[in-house]
């Protein structure tokens, strides 16, 4: 067997434009891209658009947008199979000439007759038992097959019915017997090649050295190997990836289990770096305790030998944690930009950015906070439940006196020194003189926010500013004085 001389590592990602970018497909792209990039190789984006019935309009743009968002950049492409029909026909003619392909002359009705015959004989139905050749005439096949006109369906003729053995770079030595071989369709009646044919032709033409794909392709590998053999071409290295399992870890992650299109995660406010980080760890282990890393670090660490055999569970809690870790790594400028995208003009206050970041795992959480009114107190005077202004069993008059003392202390802080650190020093000095710190800190906090759970009072005072703080605290005193 021969193959094109290629000293470079060449990988590819070859999605079908069917409208949904599953995280499993993205992980395949990610591993293929990382392996090529680490080895200074070539990563090809190929669009397998030969099944026109399943193609969804806009899907190619969607694939490109998804990969670009994740920072998965290709060396060549996007290459569309639909623009390569002459190449597939050339290979088809080559197989016909070698005696490895024939025109499928049967109608669906005739095939059904053959299928029933196999059922009656209690054996699996195989097209190769009904080839239109004289050796199969006794089975009902045609003695003189028609010539291919470039349009009629063309089948591969599996001449070498044997057990195939191959080495997978993840799963090791694998094999499958004669039952896995049959005369599969190469070219369909619409003039387009099938996946089984087109992807092999393209991998040969593009010099692909490593093919990464899911476990579902293991059962079809003997077909692929028989076709490589017929074309007298050495197969590439196969790298089988373990499946991404659903939340319960019992079956592959599917739409019914909550699988989302990858761009939905962007819409929910996840960082692309976090998605890459998270997906890379499902089925692959860096061999260290490091769980948070950027793309460049992932590329340097990536090694096919560290891909596991068993499927990894898709855990959104882990994704949220990883995303929060990546949020922490953003610059102040980037944090402000992301947070402000979700805020109204009244809330675009730089000082509240750290407060929001503390409470979210993804940026869409901010939208939920805003809708629930959890940030309203930053620009609206709060409404109180009077009894909640009082800390435990503290007397009303004592609470009023504590708030007044707090106001006096806040007024002593100059504008130049008005920040959360100085505010904390002044108020904590007062709080430490009381039986319980909560006697002063609680009513101030509640008076400023109107919420039992809110940022600490020092931060609230810093964000709201001296004038607004004193106004709100005086309002609380007036309410308490009327009881």
Image: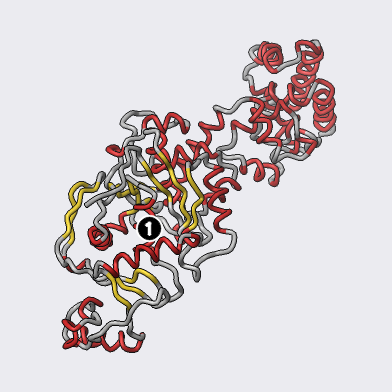
| On screen, residue 385 above or below 358 | below
What x and y, as percent, mark residue 220?
A: 28, 62
Q: Nearer the viewer, residue 223 or 249?
A: 223
Q: Quadrant of residue 43?
A: top left
Left or right of 119, for residue 67: right
Q: On the rendered structure, is 469 left or right of 315? A: right
Closer to us: 21 or 130: 130
Left or right of 386, for residue 433: left
The residue lying at 30 percent from left, 55 percent from top is 215
Colour mode of the rendering? secondary structure
Q: Residue furthest left?
A: 162
Residue 113 placed where, x, y %?
A: 28, 89
Q: Quadrant of residue 94?
A: bottom left
Is 157 located above or below residue 220 in the figure? Answer: below
Q: At 29% from the left edge and 66% from the top edge, which residue is drawn?
A: 95
Out of 343 and 479, give the one closest to the viewer. Answer: 343
- Where residue 149 appears, x then y in whole percent? 39, 77
Rendered image quadrant of residue 118: bottom left
Q: Nearer the viewer, residue 319 or 105?
A: 105
Neighbour tally class for label 1: few under 14, some 14-19, many 20 plus, Cα within 10 Å: some
Answer above or below: position of 482 versus 81: above
Q: Which residue is mark 1?
A: 199
Q: Quadrant of the C terminus?
A: top right
């Amino acid at each position: 067997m021969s193959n094109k001389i290629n000293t470079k590592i060449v990988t590819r990602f070859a999605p079908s434009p069917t409208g949904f970018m599953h995280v499993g497909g993205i992980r395949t792209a990610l591993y293929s891209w990382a392996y090529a990039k680490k080895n200074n190789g070539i990563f090809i984006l190929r669009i397998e658009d030969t099944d026109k019935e399943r193609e969804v309009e806009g899907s190619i743009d969607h694939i490109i947008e998804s990969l670009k968002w994740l920072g998965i950049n290709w060396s060549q492409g996007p290459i569309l199979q639909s623009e390569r029909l002459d190449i597939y026909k050339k290979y088809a003619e080559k197989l016909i000439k070698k005696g490895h392909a024939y025109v499928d002359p049967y109608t669906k009705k005739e095939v059904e007759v053959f299928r029933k015959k196999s059922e009656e004989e209690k054996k699996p139905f195989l097209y190769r038992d009904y080839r239109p050749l004289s050796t199969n005439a006794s089975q009902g096949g045609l003695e003189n097959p028609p010539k291919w006109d470039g349009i009629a369906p063309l089948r591969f003729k599996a001449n070498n019915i044997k057990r195939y053995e191959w080495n997978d770079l993840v799963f090791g030595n694998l094999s499958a017997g004669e039952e896995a071989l049959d005369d599969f369709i190469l070219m369909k009646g619409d003039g387009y090649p099938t996946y089984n044919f087109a992807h092999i032709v393209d991998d040969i033409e593009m010099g692909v050295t490593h093919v990464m794909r899911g476990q579902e392709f293991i059962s079809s590998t003997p077909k692929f190997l028989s076709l490589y053999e017929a074309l007298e071409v050495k197969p590439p290295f196969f790298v089988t990836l373990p499946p991404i399992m659903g939340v319960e870890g019992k079956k592959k992650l599917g739409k019914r289990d909550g699988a989302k299109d990858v761009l939905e995660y962007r819409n929910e406010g996840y960082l692309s770096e976090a998605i890459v980080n998270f997906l890379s760890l499902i089925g692959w282990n860096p061999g260290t305790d490091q769980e948070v890393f950027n793309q460049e670090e992932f590329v340097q660490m990536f090694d096919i030998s560290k891909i596991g055999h068993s499927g990894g569970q898709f855990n959104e809690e882990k994704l949220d944690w990883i995303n929060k870790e990546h949020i922490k790594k953003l610059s102040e400028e980037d944090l402000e930009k992301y947070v402000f995208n979700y805020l109204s003009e009244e809330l675009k206050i730089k000082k509240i950015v750290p407060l929001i970041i503390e409470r979210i795992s993804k940026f869409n959480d901010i939208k939920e906070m805003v809708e629930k009114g959890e940030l309203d107190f930053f620009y609206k005077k709060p409404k109180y439940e009077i009894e909640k202004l009082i800390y435990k069993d503290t007397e009303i008059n004592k609470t009023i006196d504590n708030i007044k003392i707090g106001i006096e202390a806040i007024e002593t802080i100059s504008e130049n020194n008005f920040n959360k650190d100085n505010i904390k020093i002044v108020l904590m000095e007062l709080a430490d003189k009381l039986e319980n710190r909560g006697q002063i800190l609680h009513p101030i906090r509640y008076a400023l926010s109107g919420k039992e759970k809110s940022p600490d009072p020092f931060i609230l005072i810093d964000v709201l500013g001296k004038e607004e703080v004193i106004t709100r605290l005086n309002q609380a005193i007036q309410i308490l004085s009327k009881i």
